[in-house]
Amino acid sequence: MRRLDRWLVTLGLFIAAGCIGFLSSRHVWTADWTRGARASLAPESVAVLSKLPGPVEVVGYLSPTGPLREQTAAVIERYAREKHDLTLAFIDPDKDPAASRQLGISGDGALLIRYKGREERVESPINERNLSNALERLARGGERLIAFVTGDGERQGDGVANADLGIFMRQVERRGIRAVPLNFAQTQGVPEHTDLVVLASPSASLSPQAVGALVDYVHGGGNLLWLTEPSNDNLGTGALADVLGVRILPGVLVDGQGSTLNVQDPRIIVEADYPFHAITRGFRDTTLYPQAAALAQVSDHDWAVVPFLRSSERSWTAFGGIDNDKPSTVAFHPEAGELKGPLDFGFALNRLSPSPDKSEQRAVVIGDGDFLSNTYVGNGGNRALGERIVNWLLGDDVLVNLPPRGAPDRVVTVSQDGLNALTFGFLIALPVLLVAAGGFIAWRRRRR
C-alpha cells in the first residue's frame, strides 16, 4: 500500500510539472524583483506606449555580427511586454547598402520605428531614453510646418537640383513634417503656425522687406535655421546677424585634418569630434562640410550661444582664390589677416522666448549649406545630424525625461575615518586574529 502511495505521489508530481509546462507555453508571467524595477520600463515610457493605439513596427538595421542585435532585442523586449502589437525585425545593412544609404543608415546602424505611415529613427546608443523619445514624437502626430525662404536664390526644400535639400526633406516629411515655400515678395511676414523658418544659402542679396520680416520673426520668438556660405555676409543679412549676435568671418575655412581620411581637398571640413551640446550628444558619425564659413559670436547679447561644430587646430580661414586643380597647395598667411583654428562654424542659440505662447526660442546658424544638399546629404552622418538639428529646433530633443534608475549599491561612500578603520582591520587586525586563532588551535592539539 505504501509503495502504491509513493507511485501515486510520483505520478501526481509528473502531472503537475506537465501542467505547469503547458500553461507556461500559453501564458507569460514576468516579475521584476530589482530595486526600483530597473529591468522594466519606467512609468514615463509606459505612458508613452499608451498613446500609441495600433501596431508599432521596429526595424533594426544592424549587423548580425557583434552584440548590438542581442542588446537591442533585450531593450525592445521590455516594450513588447507592455505593448503586445510592437514587433521587431532585423535587416543586415551590408546586404542592402543602397537602401541603407537612402535611409541615412551609417556607423553602428540604427532602428527605424514605423507607426501609422510615419517613422522615426533611433541611433546608437539604443536605450530606453532614445526609444521613448522617438515613440513620443510619433505619438504627438500632427503636421509641423517648416517654411523655406525663397525668391533670392536659396536652396529649395522640395528641389531636385544638386544644391537643393529635396532628398533630406523627403526623409524628414515621413515624420509628419511638411516643407512650404515662403516668398516675402508675395506675403507680409511669416504666416502663423509656422514651426520653423529656414534661410538656406541665398545667392543674391535679400530685399529689405525679406530681411525686415525675418528680423521681426526672430524678435517675435520664432525658431530659425540659417545656413550661410562664405561671402554671404554681403547679401544684406547684417541686420539678421545682429539680432542673433553672430558674425560670418571672411574667407573659406580650410582644414588639413581631412587628409588623414583620404579627403584631399582641404576646403571639405571633416568633423568627427563634436563640442558637447544636446544636438551632438552621443553622436559619433563623421560629417562633411564643403566650403564652409567660420563664425564668431558677439558678446553682450541675450542669446546663449553654444558652438557644436568646430574645425581642428590645423584649420584656418583662407583668403583669395584656391587652385581647384591643386587645392592642397593652399598655405596659411597670417600677415593677410587669416585666422588660425580651431574655429567654430556651427552655433546653437537659445533664450527665453519673447512670445508668451512659448517658453524657449531656438536658432541654429551653420556656415555651410552643402552638407544637407542632394549632393552631400548621403555622406557619412550628414543626414542624421540634420535630423538632430531639426529635432532640436522643433523642441523634440528631449520629450520624455526619464529619471536615473541605477543600482543603489553601485557607489559606496566611505569617510576617511571609516577608510582608516577598514585599512587597519583588513591589513593588521584580521591577519593578527587569524595568526592567533591558528596558534591557539595548534596549542590545543599539542595538549591532547
Image (spheres, rainbow, N blue to C red):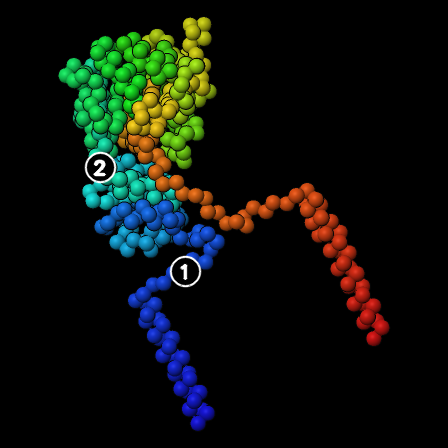
**At 41% across and 29% down in the image, what residue appears?**
277
The residue tagged 1 is 31
Q: Is residue 143 left or right of residue 231?
A: left
In this rendering, the answer to whether 297 lies above or below 66 is above
Residue 396 can be seen, yes or no: yes
Tell me the CA gap for discs 1 and 2: 37 Å
Crowdedness of circle 1 by 10 Å Cα count: few (<14), some, many (20+)? few
**Residue topped by disc 2:** 142
Q: Quadrant of the C terminus?
A: bottom right
Outermost residue, front side: 356
SS at mark 2?
Answer: loop
The image position of residue 233, as x and y in percent, is: 31, 11
Q: How dense is the environment of label 2, judged by Cα within 10 Å: few (below 14), some, or many (20 and up)?
A: few
Comparing 301 with 443, the one in front is 301
Q: Are marks 1 and 2 in contact (CB under 8 Å)?
A: no
Q: Quadrant of residue 437?
A: bottom right
